[in-house]
Amino acid sequence: MNMAPLALHGLPKRLVDDHLIEPQDLEVATHSAKTANISPVQYLCEKNLVSDKAIGNSAAKEFGIPIYALEHHSHDSVPKDLIDIKLLKKHQVMPLVQRGNRLFIAIADPTNHRALNEIQFQTGIAVEPVLALYSAIGQALDNWLEENSSQDIGEVLGTIDDLHLDDLDMEAVEEDDSNGGAANTEDEAPIVRFINKMLVDAIKLGASDIHFEPYEKSYRVRFRVDGILQEVARPTANLAQRLAARLKVMSRMDISERRIPQDGRVKLKLSKSKSIDFRVNTLPLQFGEKIVLRILDASSAQLGIDALGYEDDQKTIYMDALARPQGMILVTGPTGSGKTVSLYTGLNILNTAERNISTAEDPVEINMDGINQTQINMRVGLSFAEALRSFLRQDPDVVMVGEIRDLETAEIAIKAAQTGHLVMSTLYTNSAPETLTRLLNMGVPSFNVATSVNLIIAQRLGRKLCSHCRQPFDDIPDRILEDEGFFEIGLPREEFTIYKAGDCANCTNGYKGRVGVYETLKISPAISKLIMQGGSSLDILQTALDEGFRTLRVSALRKVARGLISIEEANRITKD
């Protein structure tokens, strides 16, 4: 056979350098793959010339990206009817999730431009490759196609109307017996139908929370969509007690107890294979009980780091910290800023058969297979600190603490980080540099902070501009741009376009979905030295800036420059 000499570069060169295949064998395989009209990686895997795990490890090293654990990916997030099944099978790729005008695709060879280009041409959407094992893609694709033969969530929701809202299958999730679950009572059909409609409407709109609020002469229901509350219904005030009773029965609470807050969970079964979980909390008010339902989206933990909005250098810093065997990663920000999703995404990356991962959470929001999740229960003495002590006797590799609230928890977490464990947790501070000061103010010795903390991520969530109706904002004077800080973001003015919100049927007031805005503070030797010398958060910030650190404000303005969010949104989430 006459073959042109094979020029080795990229992944093929890595396979040879890793001694997975001889150069002459790779040359034969490459030409055979071309003849078979498939990619070389696909040919190597199908012919069992190199194991897909070995190829995946080499690709991860070559491109500096992790292997995505497809077995933990929720099929609920997979876009339906977007790509021809024949095309997926031909290239052995798996769609994961669509975020705006980007489609994330699991693929064994991120350099398989032919597959990515064909998918992009068919869908008209920018394609982002996510590295996964060849065999895992095949298994996930088969499972998804099998599940997809039945109704998906969208189809199920589309079939629900007022005539069927009283037939929805609700299942209370009983977490302990101390709530005193009430006996079943005979439900009133209008109340049942109304509440079920609110739950279904919230899911359709992509809401994160549902608020049922009683007042003296009125009652209102609000959804939090893309971080903003909006009123959706005003039932009459005399229904307040009956609505509260129904919600409490659904979530197995004591309906006779109206003086103290209660917690519960409820599962809404949409079909045999599809369900949505809600976390329910009641709060006694002057004119009744306010009840808030948090919609728990398991797919948010399965998106992968590329879907969260990190810039390339920020993602690299986070991935490097996750790859370290010990130390501490802290995520900070206000309630609702996406801290839990950032932590779960990191845990999902680390979740392999070789690692023992334990978490202490209050509450456990999303169940993750392969991770040992502990629900904090202060009534029986199971605090974060107590759970941490138990973890350290369970041979852990990775420990996640839902929140560092006190000195005792901080000291145990830092001890774990210093003794060969990777520790992940959250704090409520406004910025990454302030987090170091907060630990010192708790009473943690500066030496322990400097030697245990590897990375601090501060974050916010900004509403994304709707890609269908956003409008160029061309007439902004340079003086305004300078005042806002655009001349400090490191992007030439001619290279970006600023957009403002429009209004269309595809969005809410010009916004649809959210994107993360981050600052990633890597604890360098210079910053460690400054911590031990008692430097202030301003001193730490200046040193970090000298090393290339970007603040939340700058990160937000860079997203404005890329057309993802508006100036108003950047000001809402980052401007003092």
Image: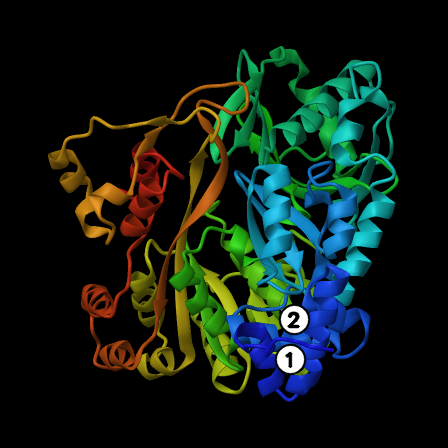
User: In this image, 447 relative to 513: left or right?
Assistant: left
- Image quadrant of residue 166? top right
Q: Which residue is mark 2?
A: 358
User: Front-most of 409 and 520?
Assistant: 520
Name the secondary structure under disc 2: strand
Residue 263 numbered tag:
none
Q: Quadrant of residue 140?
A: bottom right
Structure colour scheme:
rainbow
* Residue 192: x %, y % from top left: 78, 21
In the displayed structure, 530 sits above or below 301; it is below
Residue at the extreme front: 2
Amino acid type indicated by mark 1: Pro
* Residue 433 makes an appearance in the image: yes
Q: Is residue 187 visible?
A: no
Q: Report helix, strand or loop for mark 1.
A: loop
Q: Quadrant of residue 444?
A: bottom left
Could you say which is closer to the camera, residue 179 or residue 67? 67
- Provide residue 124's location: percent of width, then percent of height: 57, 37
Residue 174, relative to residue 417: is it above or below? Answer: above
The percent position of residue 220, horizontal first and vertical second, equals: 56, 18
Mark found first going from the N terminus, 1 or 2: 2
Residue at point 46% right, 47% down?
A: 337
Residue under label 1: 396
Mark 2 belongs to which amino acid?
Answer: Ser
Taking the image as shown, residue 312 lies to the left or right of residue 8, namely left
Is the C terminus in the top left, top right, bottom left or bottom right quadrant?
Answer: top left
Query: Residue at 75% across / 38% down in the picture?
Result: 251
The mark total stands at 2
